[in-house]
Amino acid sequence: MKQYIVIGLGNFGASVAKTLVDKGYNVLAIDKNKEKVQELANTVTHAVEADATDEEVLKTLGVRNFDLAVVSIGNNIHANVLTTLLLKELGVSYVIVKAQDNLHGNLLSKVGADRIIYPERDMGVRIAHNLISSNVMDYLEFSPNYSIIELPVTASMVGKNLAELKIGSQYNVNLVAIKRKGEINISVRNDISFSSGDIMVVFGSNNDLKELQNSI
Ligand code: ADP
């Protein structure tokens, strides 16, 4: 059973901790703020009120025995970077850290963060994509050039099958799944005909996806 540490129990950290517990994992949650710790005390495996920038505290909590740590200390960049450095020096093999901007992210990679995330920026990008392309229901950036999007089928596609529509070959994209009435079909065969209300889950380069969006 994997053991996780979540440090900083603001909105993001608390939500990570609760989800891991929901999925059945052990979570050690740490925050220096008493109220934040109390809010999660009955949810997570252990909730501890502590300053994560204190090396002795981290040692006492046995952080080196954990597989993965998520550092979600927000505004205090100094505490965020120092905690990351200490976790790596104490031997936590995988440390994921929430960064505020690219400069902060660069600093974190220099002190050994294994993965740097920008939740607010990424969510902003995702929402903006949803807003500007009215037919895109959801958008997930895979890398700067590749994404997955959800597109509802259009009236002209209903009743036709994939062999006829040739979406993949025509637009150089990969139709990875079809959502129908809340169910997801991931074995997309060529003889499947689209029904009204179907949603296509499509992977491809941003340019190809844009062309698909504009053409259907
Ligand atoms: P969010 O934007 O996800 O709500 P916040 O910046 O509001 O994030 O929350 C960060 C959390 O990190 C706060 O609960 C704060 O008490 C905690 N925190 C800040 N510094 C430390 C530290 N040195 N040790 C432990 N927790 C800390």
Image (spheres, grey):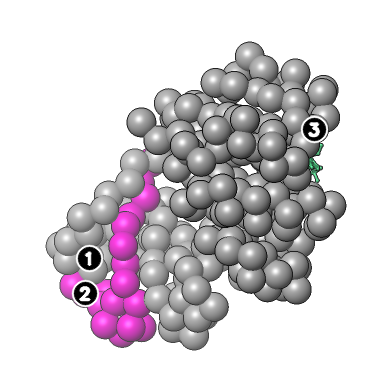
Residue type, label 3: Lys
Label 1 CA crowd tier, 10 Å (few <14, some 14–19, many 20+): some
Magenta-colored span: 163-181
Report the residue marked by disc 2. 164
Callout 2 secondary element = helix
Asked whether, in this view, residue 178 is left or right of residue 52, the answer is left
Cα–Cα gap, marks 3 and 1: 57 Å
Residue type, label 2: Glu
Q: Position of residue 86 (x, y in %)?
A: 65, 51
Q: Residue at x 53, y 68 (%)?
A: 141
Q: Residue at x 51, y 48 (%)?
A: 92
Q: Position of residue 157 (x, y in %)?
A: 35, 67
Residue 161 numbered tag: 1
Whichever of callouts 3 and 2 sits on the residue coming sooner in the sequence is 3
Q: Position of residue 187 (x, y in %)?
A: 20, 55
Q: Residue at x 39, y 67 (%)?
A: 202
